[in-house]
Image (spheres, rainbow, N blue to C red):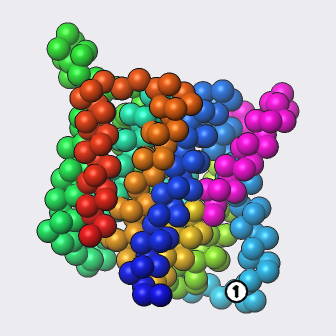
Amino acid sequence: MSPTILSILSGIAGMFGWGIYDFLGGVFAKQIGSFKSLFWSQLAGSVSVLLLAFIFTKSISLPLLVILLLPIAAMVYSAGYLFFFKGFEIGNVSIVAATMNLWAVFTMLFAFIFMGQRLSMAQTLGVLMIISGVTLASLNWSDIKKQGFQFSAGVKEAIFGAFFFGIFWNISEIISEEIGWLLTTVLVKFGIVLFLLIFSFLTKKEIGITKTSAKVIYTIVLMGIIEAGAVAIVNYGLTIGDAILITPIASALSIVTITLAIIFLKDKVTKLQGLGIITAIVGIIVTAF
C-alpha cells in the first residue's frame, strides 16, 4: 500500500477517534468539569498504549533531540486540550468543535514555515475555506447587531487550543520519525499525565472522581482509549507521510463531533453558523488533495 493511501487512512482513523473523544469530552466537561474529564481520560489512554508498548517495543533509544522535544510536546498538547475542554464546558459543542478546526491551519502553517512542507493550490483554497467557515461559525451574529463584535462562548478558548495543537503535531512528526509512532505515543501520553498532575497541584485543581457514577467512569476510560488509539495511528501515519497531508484529514473530526452533538445533545446552531460549519468541513476535505 502506498504511503499516500496509508497517510489518508491514518487521517481518517484520527478523524473518527478524535471526533468521538471530543463529543464525549464535551458531555463530561459539563458534567464533572473539563479538568477531571481530561485528566482521567488521558491516564486511561496512557495505560492502554503502555500495554501495547510492552508487547511490541523491544528496545528504547532516545536521541538528545527527542529528549528535549518530549516535554515541550507534552506541555503544548496538554495546553491544547485544557483550552479545548474549557471551551466545551462553557460553550456550544458544535460551535466549539467547528472553531477547533483551526488546528489544521496552524499545523499546516507551522509545517510550511519551519519544516519546508508546501501546499498545493487546492490546499491553499481549503485553508481559506476553513478560516472563513470558522469565522462564520464562531461569531454570535445576532448579538453583534445589538452589542457589537463578540465571540460565542467557548470560541476564544478553542482558538488557543487550536494554536497549541498546531505546534504539537509538527513536533510529534519530528519525534515519530526519530523513535517510531508507538514509543512517541507512549512517552507523550505519560508526559501529558505528569504535566496535568503538576498543573493540578500548582492550581489546586480537584481531580478526585470518587463520587462519580461507575457508568461515567467506564465511559471516560473508554474515551481515553479511543483517543490514544487515534494519536497512535496518526503518529504511525506521520512516520510514512507528511503532517501537511494527514492533519487536514484528521481535523475533519468535527464532522463526527458535530453530528453526534446535534443528534444526542440537540445542539442548536443558526443558519449562518451552520453554513460556517459546512464551509470549514469542506475546506478540510479540500486540503487533502
Residue depicted at 49% across the width and 70% down the height: 10
Q: Is residue 41 above or below residue 167?
A: above
Residue 243 is left or right of residue 82, and the answer is: left
Residue 50 x, y percent position in the rendering: 75, 69
Our reading of the magenta stretch's main secondary structure is helix
Residue depicted at 77% across the width and 62% down the height: 47
Q: Is residue 63 magenta?
A: no
Q: Is residue 209 above or below residue 4?
A: above
Residue 213 is left or right of residue 286, and the answer is: right
Residue at the left extreme, as displayed: 121
**Residue 43 seen from this side:** no
Residue 224 x, y percent position in the rendering: 68, 52
Residue 283 appears in which quarter of the rendering? bottom left
Look at label 1 and name its amino acid: Ile
Residue 247 x, y percent position in the rendering: 40, 64
SS category of the residue bearing label 1: loop
Residue 71 x, y percent position in the rendering: 57, 65
- Toward the viewer: 67 or 189? 189
Residue 220 is left or right of residue 227, and the answer is: right
Instruction: State the extent of the magenta-drawn residues as a range.
Output: 204-229
Q: Which residue is mark 1?
A: 60
